[in-house]
Image (cartoon, grey):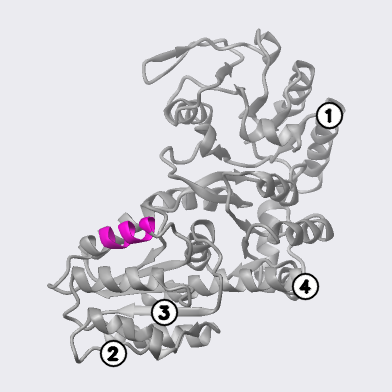
Amino acid sequence: MDRNLEALFRPKSIAVIGASEKPGKIGYAVMKNLVEYGYEGKIYPVNIKGVEIEINGKKFKSYRSILDVPDEVDMAVIVVPAKFVPQVVEEAGKKGVKVLPIISSGFGELGEEGKKVERQIVETAHKYGMRILGPNIFGVVYTPAKMNATFGPTDVMPGNLALISQSGALGIALMGWTILEKVGLSAVVSVGNKSDIDDADLLEFFKEDENTKAILIYMEGVKDGRRFMEVAREVSKEKPIIIIKAGRSERGAKAAASHTGSLAGADKIYEAAFKQSGVLRALTIGEAFDWARTLSNLPEPEGENVVILTNGGGIGVMATDAAEEEGLHLYDNLEDLKVFANHMPPFGSYKNPVDLTGMAGAESYEGAVRDALANPNMHSIAVLYCQTAVLDPRDLAKIVIREYNESGRKKPLVVAIVGGIEAKEAIDMLNEEGIPAYPEPERAIKSLAALYRWSRWKAKQRRE
């Protein structure tokens, strides 16, 4: 593993160059996030005035230059204005820093002059064996190391999904959105102008990272398309990659170029390359995170047979339509499905989708979920529920969590609960436990289908 990228995600010490004592400044926010998120390594503020910085009652002595820091520094987060960055990079190199996330903007995104300075700082970094992340970024998070070196939200929920974003503002917004939606993250990386460390470098790191099960990228363009696709293809054989590729239209591509100095390129080329590389392309943020829930939390299916359990004919039919559209196979062996007759009134239907009826209470769902998990011919399960007075959705969530954990989580299981406030609480409970849950049946089915698409692509690679 690249020692510089190791230092980016697991640094033993961090300097914040441009640290500030004033709340509201980015140099203060980065310090505050490092402290509040629980980073356990050494933190060294660097401030040209040498002011004392206080965060939550904890006082930090600041150093006028990184060269004055008495100990080794693995990573230095740079938050000074662009004109000072070349000098700061030179000093960090002399200090022996391994990696530099540069939050400062005012480089390649401004045109040719900025690109020249960008190339210069990368040359300086490489001269000293350093790597640069950015510039023009909001920082980096790695939850297993309790490190939040960003000016984004503090309370990122730990999980198995790595999020890479080329857009700063969108990346910060997505961090906040994952907290609200209970999506657990292993890492958040803002790549900005990608002057040095790019998506391919990060994919190589996450391929080896035991804390990451899936990778989600918001991308406007790549600098070395061939290398990216070669790396993506290798990584996809082990871990799923979901990409939201912006700049699909001609006008969108021009907007991307002015935003991060990125060449968006012809969309059809990206589309074909993604397919070859096993990358799953999502068209919206919602779709990307829906898929990411299944791909970062669930095991691969051992076969094609999907069983839908529901208490409402309507949502069962909607889920069936979605399954058909997505190429999922609904298991139809009535001999096996007959077991569900034990958990429904005589007017229920054990044909798939299995309709437990609106009378289905805790015992019906408990028995049906348990039987579906136990049957080796039922490879994936979708549990659907329309909120009724018979069963509190939160009690259903507890049943699913208990049964799935006791079964050893060996097969994919997704949940959709349609209803009011209690339904939302139940969905959050399930997602916090790493069981993908949604407010609409189609979203649950389409997310399961994304898992199948990736799994089938992998199987095809093995055959070839």
Question: 284 left or right of 24?
Answer: right
Q: Mark 2 vs mark 3: which is more N-terminal?
A: 3
**Residue 424 visible in this rendered orientation of the protein:** no
Spot occupied by residue 363 in the image (x, y as percentages of width and height):
20, 70
Q: Residue furthest front?
A: 335
- Residue 308 in view, yes or no: yes
Q: Is residue 391 above or below residue 347?
A: above
**For the residues carrying marks 2 and 1, which lies nearer the camera in this image?**
2
Answer few, some or many: residues within 10 Å of disc 2's Cα (few below 14, many 20 plus, some between 14 and 19).
some
Q: Determine whether the residue tagged by mark 3 lies in a helix, strand or loop.
A: strand
Looking at the figure, which quarter contains the C terminus?
Answer: bottom right
**First-in-chain label (2 vs 1):** 1
Q: Amino acid at mark 1?
A: Thr
Query: Could you tell which of marks 3 and 4 lies nearer the N-terminus?
Result: 4
* Pointer 3 residue: 307
CA separation in Å, label 1 and label 3: 58 Å
Image quarter of residue 82? top right
* Quarter of the image where one finds residue 141: top right
Q: Would residue 49 appear left or right of 401 to someone viewing this image?
A: right
Give the magenta-colored segment's residue range. Answer: 397-406
Q: Who's the residue at 76% across and 73% down the image?
A: 463
Three-letter amino acid code of the residue under disc 3: Val
Q: Which disc number belongs to residue 269?
A: 4
Residue 161: x, y in percent?
54, 51
